[in-house]
Amino acid sequence: MYNKIILAGNLTRDVEVRYTQGGSAIGNTAIATSRKFKSATGEQKEEVLFVDITFFGRTAEIANQYLRKGSKVLVDGRLKLDQWTAQDGSKRSKHSVTVENLQMLGSKDDSQGYNAAPAGDTYSQPAPQQQGYSAPSQSAPQPAPQQAAPTNIPEIDINEDEIPF
């Protein structure tokens, strides 16, 4: 099956990085996206969506170094369902995105005030290796080498009024 999601928006908080025992970085934050539309009554409305996102390896370190709350990004990755039991015993769940590719958006003026990377740089996770139906390895993933922008991202026809920033 195919599981791919592409989101463009603004980070809702700074990237929080922690490290596994093997030394691999894991970065967590969230992205806010919005869409504007007219209701049945002709009223202009805006719908905002907040999605938790997770970066791994070198991409997590780069995101932590160059991105801050409000940074404009384009991410693509896999949709994941997180499930847990709350302290009160109730079952809880939420969807999140495991980021495979990160593209920093915005102008250089937007990036003043912190150690800024050039806008438009893309950072990718290494492609997972297929190993049949065996159990996943417990070894930590290796950092991804810096790569050129992928050519397999489809063109998206977006109206300027629909962009959330």
Image (cartoon, rainbow, N blue to C red):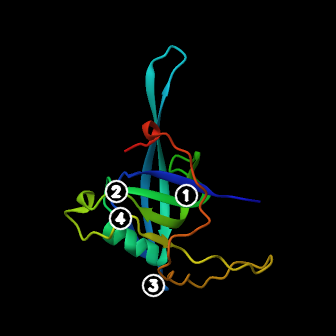
Q: CA distance from mark 4 to mark 3?
A: 28 Å
Q: Is residue 48 visible?
A: no
Residue under the point 37% across and 45% down: 165
Q: Is residue 136 visible?
A: yes
- Judged by depth in the image, the label closer to the viewer, 2 or 3, is 2
Badge 4 amino acid: Ala
Residue lying farthest to the left in this orientation = 113
- Judged by depth in the image, the label closer to the viewer, 1 or 4, is 4
Disc 2 secondary structure class: loop
From the viewer's perspective, is residue 7 above or below residue 115? above
Badge 1 amino acid: Val
Q: Earlier in the sequence, mark 2 or mark 3?
A: 3
From the viewer's perspective, is residue 31 above or below residue 142? above
Query: Crowding at label 2, few (<14), some or many (≥20) Cα neighbours within 10 Å?
Result: some
Seen from the viewer's position, the closer of residues 163 and 15 is 163
Disc 4 secondary structure class: loop
Q: CA distance from mark 1 to mark 3?
A: 22 Å
What's the mark number on residue 119? Answer: 4
- The location of residue 156, given as percent across then percent down, is 57, 50
> Which image quarter: residue 151?
bottom right
Q: Earlier in the sequence, mark 1 or mark 3?
A: 3
Residue under the point 77% across and 60% down: 1
- Judged by depth in the image, the label closer to the viewer, 1 or 3, is 1
Q: Evaluate if marks 2 and 4 touch, with contact meaning CB atoms under 8 Å apart.
A: yes
Q: Evaluate if marks 1 and 3 touch, with contact meaning CB atoms under 8 Å apart.
A: no
What's the mark number on residue 106? Answer: 2
Residue marked by disc 1: 97
Query: Crowding at label 1, few (<14), some or many (≥20) Cα neighbours within 10 Å?
Result: many
Q: Evaluate if marks 2 and 1 touch, with contact meaning CB atoms under 8 Å apart.
A: no
- The location of residue 99, given as percent across then percent down, is 53, 64
- The location of residue 71, given as percent across then percent down, is 34, 56
